[in-house]
């Protein structure tokens, strides 16, 4: 799928100013021989504290890596569970710092839910768990796809003998995975009745006949016809699937690896459970949903009918961490744990105490890394705290493939529009806002200033690229406003619109304490350039609803990458995505034409040139103020063995082991 704010693939993500794009930078990693934290790519020193976004931001990701740290040696050393009771079920206990919404892939709007579903549903392909840079490998497919020279026809053979987990919907019969189950998954996300955030991304792939079938349902106001033939998406036989596209799509395989949203689904299960399908996910994956207490606890258990799948990967020859993990686990049957218990812990102090008290095994991945305010305790000056090191705690730090951003509603009567004076207003706001101060004081140094919407680790990202997007220059901001007619002031000294009407910036915000810091910084910065600011407070879901409807003027949020292609991040500027991934409702024909050309081009110099043009247009019109790329800080107890931060994917629970002998030592001390 092509990009998204965490609404699903957009939703990949929309997070708050904190969480959303996820990617990992493959540059410098820790030396496992030394067992110490490595520095961030580009030799940027890590500051003592990390704020990956406000606490409330963490509660969502709707919607988006690398250096292994200090305890790598412990991670790959002792044989997991060697001294433990081999008959005792192995339980992985992890937190989510924001709640899930549904386990129906067609209706997911948050990152928490997207983290659960790929452990239940499976795609045709997956990402190699250890390869950096990333590689695709077959999951349920029988080999890599056959692709036509023009990238318009993709044919995939499916492994026979893969079965869905047993479920009453199958009426006592074993149900084999078939090509039609993938067709059905794609159909469901474009069915208007499901209002799937992922639908627009699938339609952007130009599958022959799919948009037309959706249009028939919309225009006729009737149910989507799941039995109608779709020329571009055919099950040629039980185990052969063919996609035909209207235009070249060299990176179409990214869709075929999206198990969280496009994993195989059995139609009879969806029809059996109806509106309750979100509570009854049934897939072919390594785990099954055993218990779900909404917003509190999620329990997955090993799928007893899961096929024989062995640990394998292809880390680079010079990737010492990856090679050590491969040597430790190669050939182990997956999953290595029997049960996964997810605890939803929204508040940061209880989350931190849960880790210190060993009630959870790790603070890792996008759904629950170390809370910002506790980074100074956990990693003072970028090094693992002695008290934690003494307990054998493992630590990782890395630059995330994400952005924190501020968007302007381009349809808004005050900040929207394409006339020179409106463009000048947005660029003045951008220049007036002090991102470096935000990072230093609120994010406590745990981010780097962003220069464009492209995120680290994705194609199109250039760490050497510099633009006005990253500048703080109040003098220039004031000069811009004066030049374009914002010269008159009201009785309080605030600027008026060029026609003399009141000028009020309305920033949407959230009630958590951390947002007060963001609000105060924004208010102070805008006052310095003569702009009055008002804040509209509501919970994140209400703001998201308003954003999709075009009702907000400005909002601070975030996004993470869920695919290696940087064009995903540019979907927020694509006109046809307005009101979906494009929350700003930016519509510029020149950008749309450039975006569509990029979709059809193979990676290379010509496409790189288009990325540079896209970044310049994004800065010139400023529908989004891109703020920062955040730093992730992760910790794990020594008994969690084999963890490596996933880059664009959410499924990793089946790739780790639990050494209960080490857990027992912790309990006895």
Image (cartoon, rainbow, N blue to C red):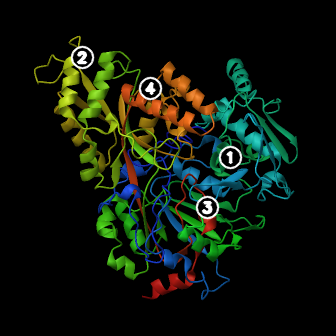
Q: Which mark is residue 550?
A: 4
Residue placed under numbered mark 3 in the picture: 129
Residue 421 higher or lower than 668, as above or below:
above
Which sits earlier in the primary sequence, circle 1 or circle 2?
Answer: 1
Q: x%, y% of residue 417? A: 38, 18
Farthest front residue in view: 605
Left or right for 536, reference 183: left
Farthest top residue in view: 499
Residue placed under numbered mark 1 in the picture: 277
Quarter where residue 467 is shown: top left
Which sits earlier in the primary sequence, circle 3 or circle 4?
Answer: 3
Q: Quadrant of the N terminus?
A: top right
- Report crowding for label 4: few under 14, some 14 to 19, many 20 or more residues within 10 A (C-alpha): some
**SS for callout 3:** loop
Q: x%, y% of residue 128? A: 64, 59
Left or right for 153, reference 625: right
Left or right for 179, reference 646: right
Residue placed under numbered mark 2 in the picture: 484
Farthest right residue in view: 237
Instruction: Nearest to the eye among marks 4 and 1: give it.
Output: 4
Q: CA distance from mark 1 to mark 2?
A: 55 Å
**SS for callout 4:** loop
Instruction: Nearest to the eye among marks 3 and 1: give it.
Output: 3
Which sits earlier in the primary sequence, circle 3 or circle 1?
Answer: 3
Quarter where residue 634 is shown: bottom left
Left or right for 118, reference 147: left
């Amino acid at each position: 799928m092509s990009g998204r704010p965490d609404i699903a693939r957009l939703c990949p993500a929309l997070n708050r100013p904190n969480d959303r794009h996820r990617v990992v930078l493959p540059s410098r990693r820790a030396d496992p021989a030394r067992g110490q934290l490595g520095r961030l790519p580009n030799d940027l020193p890590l500051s003592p504290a990390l704020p990956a976004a406000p606490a409330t931001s963490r509660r969502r990701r709707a919607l988006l890596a690398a250096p292994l740290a200090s305890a790598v040696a412990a991670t790959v050393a002792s044989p997991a569970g060697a001294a433990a009771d081999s008959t005792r079920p192995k339980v992985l206990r992890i937190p989510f710092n924001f709640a899930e919404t549904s386990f129906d892939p067609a209706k997911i709007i948050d990152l928490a839910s997207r983290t659960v579903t790929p452990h239940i549903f499976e795609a045709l392909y997956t990402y190699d768990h250890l390869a950096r840079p990333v590689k695709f490998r077959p999951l349920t497919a029988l080999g890599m796809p056959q692709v036509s020279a023009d990238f318009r026809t993709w044919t995939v053979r499916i492994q026979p003998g893969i079965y869905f987990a047993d479920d009453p919907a199958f009426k006592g019969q074993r149900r084999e995975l078939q090509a039609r189950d993938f067709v059905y998954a794609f159909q469901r996300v474009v069915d208007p009745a499901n209002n799937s955030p992922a639908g627009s991304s699938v339609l952007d792939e130009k599958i022959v006949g799919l948009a037309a079938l959706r249009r028939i349902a919309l225009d006729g106001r009737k149910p989507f016809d799941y039995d109608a033939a779709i020329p571009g998406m055919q099950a040629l036989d039980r185990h052969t699937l063919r996609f035909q596209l209207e235009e070249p799509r060299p990176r179409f395989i990214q869709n075929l690896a999206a198990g969280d949203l496009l994993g195989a689904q059995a139609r009879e299960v969806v029809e059996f459970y109806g509106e309750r399908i979100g509570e009854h996910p049934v897939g072919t994956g390594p785990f099954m949903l055993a218990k779900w207490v909404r917003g509190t606890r999620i329990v997955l258990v090993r799928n007893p009918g899961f096929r024989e799948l062995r640990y394998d990967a292809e880390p680079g020859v010079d990737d010492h961490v990856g090679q050590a993990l491969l040597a430790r686990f190669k050939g182990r049957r997956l999953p290595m744990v029997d049960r996964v218990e997810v605890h939803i812990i929204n508040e940061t102090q209880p989350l931190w105490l849960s880790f210190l008290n060993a009630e959870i095994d790790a603070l890792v991945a996008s759904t629950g890394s170390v809370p910002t305010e506790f980074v100074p305790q956990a990693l003072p000056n970028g090094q693992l705290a002695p008290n934690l090191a003494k307990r054998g705690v493992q630590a990782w730090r890395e630059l995330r493939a994400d952005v924190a951003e501020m968007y302007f509603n381009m349809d808004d009567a005050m900040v929207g529009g394409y006339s020179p004076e409106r463009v000048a207003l947005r660029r003045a706001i951008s220049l007036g806002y002090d991102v470096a101060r935000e990072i230093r004081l609120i994010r406590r140094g745990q981010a780097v200033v962003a220069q464009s919407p492209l995120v680290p680790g994705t194609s199109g990202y250039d760490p050497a690229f510099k633009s006005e997007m990253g500048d703080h220059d109040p003098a220039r901001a004031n000069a811009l406003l004066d030049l374009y007619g914002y010269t008159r002031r009201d009785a309080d000294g605030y600027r008026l619109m060029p026609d003399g009407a009141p000028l009020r910036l309305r920033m949407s915000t959230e009630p958590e304490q951390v947002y007060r810091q963001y609000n105060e910084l924004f208010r102070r910065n805008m006052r310095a350039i003569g702009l009055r600011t008002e804040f509209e407070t509501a919970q994140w879901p209400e703001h998201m609803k308003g954003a999709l409807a075009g009702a907000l003027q400005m909002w601070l949020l975030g996004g993470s990458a869920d695919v290696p292609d940087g064009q995903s991040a540019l979907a927020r500027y694509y006109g046809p995505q307005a009101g979906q991934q494009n929350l700003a409702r930016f519509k510029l024909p020149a950008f749309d034409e450039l975006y569509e050309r990029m979709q059809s081009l193979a990676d290379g110099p010509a496409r790189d040139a288009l990325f540079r043009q896209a970044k310049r247009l994004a800065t010139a019109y400023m529908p989004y103020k891109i703020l920062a790329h955040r730093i992730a800080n992760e910790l794990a107890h020594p008994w969690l063995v084999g963890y490596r931060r996933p880059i664009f994917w959410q499924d990793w629970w089946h790739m780790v082991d639990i050494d209960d002998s080490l857990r027992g030592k912790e309990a006895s001390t």
